[in-house]
Image: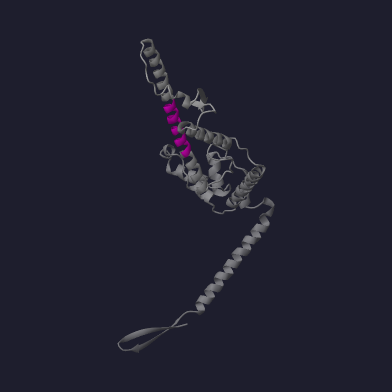
Amino acid sequence: MRPSWYHGPLPQMKPLPIHVRAMIHSRRMSREKRIIEFLELNQRREELVREAQFEEALARIAEEDGATLDTVFHRHQHEWGKVFTSLIYNTPYILFSTYLPDKPLVTRISEIHETFKRDDARLSTPYSPEMLRIIKQARREKIANKTRELERERRGVMTPRKLRRQRQGPPSHVLANLTDRQKHMDKVARSVSEIGYVAQVKKALGFKLRNAEAWDVEDGPPGDRPRLDRMLQEIDAENLRRRAKWEENAAKQICEVRFYETPPGSHLIFKS
């Protein structure tokens, strides 16, 4: 994760730990509150300046008329200090000179300004060499893990990724116009297999297969057919032998049925 006002450089974590999410949320909310407070304090400061300017102009008019005006804002303007207008974060604000007395407005604005500086420092924090090493190693492990996952899928293992792929369907506006056969072919084509019936369906749909001749492995290489035929004959012979043996054992286990009479009726006794 790239550094921001709310956190320094972090490795990409999924899911993001709860304490990190809570920290980012807390800092975001605090920064928004500080910005609002910063603007309100500057607005109050500007109002004080305008009041002082108004009283100064009014005092000059009164002096021309031979009257005296007891000012309040203009008289205490030196306590607020010299006012400079500047720009910070694309927002006009008032910056006070360093010789100002420690007044509440000045102190609080300076504190908020320092928090903005710390946010900028956090934003410009570079990645440490140790973190870069960990991130690169994590990327290599991710690629290796995904490669192993794909190999397991090709061997027939049902992974969560494979299940999501098979359960996924076309968009609703496309699905509404598909026939039953097209829906069946779409479902079959979402399998990771590339041999047999799946390969046949994918070829019909125009899929590009990794190995277009992979379906030949079902029948075996052409030069290996005699060995496979012998294996098939041996399997058939073994199946026949086992079936005959089972029938012979079943015949020996025919139950002897003997009737005997006991009141109030007849009962059957089975002996093996």
Residue that extends furthest to the top in the rendered view of this protein: 64
- Magenta residues, as a range? 30-45
Identify whether 36 is placed above or below 19.
above
Query: Disc count in the image?
Result: 0
Q: Quadrant of residue 61?
A: top left
Look at the image and tell me in which quarter the N terminus lies. Answer: top right
For image coordinates 46% across by 42% down, the residue present is 182
**Percent coordinates x, y for residue 207 in the rendering:** 56, 40
- Nearer to us in this view, 76 or 204: 76
Is residue 161 magenta-colored? no
Identify whether 270 is placed above or below 153.
below
Q: Main secondary structure of the magenta part?
A: helix
Residue that extends furthest to the left in the rendered view of this protein: 264
Residue that extends furthest to the bottom in the rendered view of this protein: 262
- Nearer to us in this view, 202 or 95: 95
- Nearer to us in this view, 205 or 210: 210
For image coordinates 63% across by 48% down, the residue present is 141
**Percent coordinates x, y for residue 95 in the rendering:** 51, 26
**Percent coordinates x, y for residue 29 in the rendering:** 46, 39
Identify whether 118 is placed above or below 252.
above
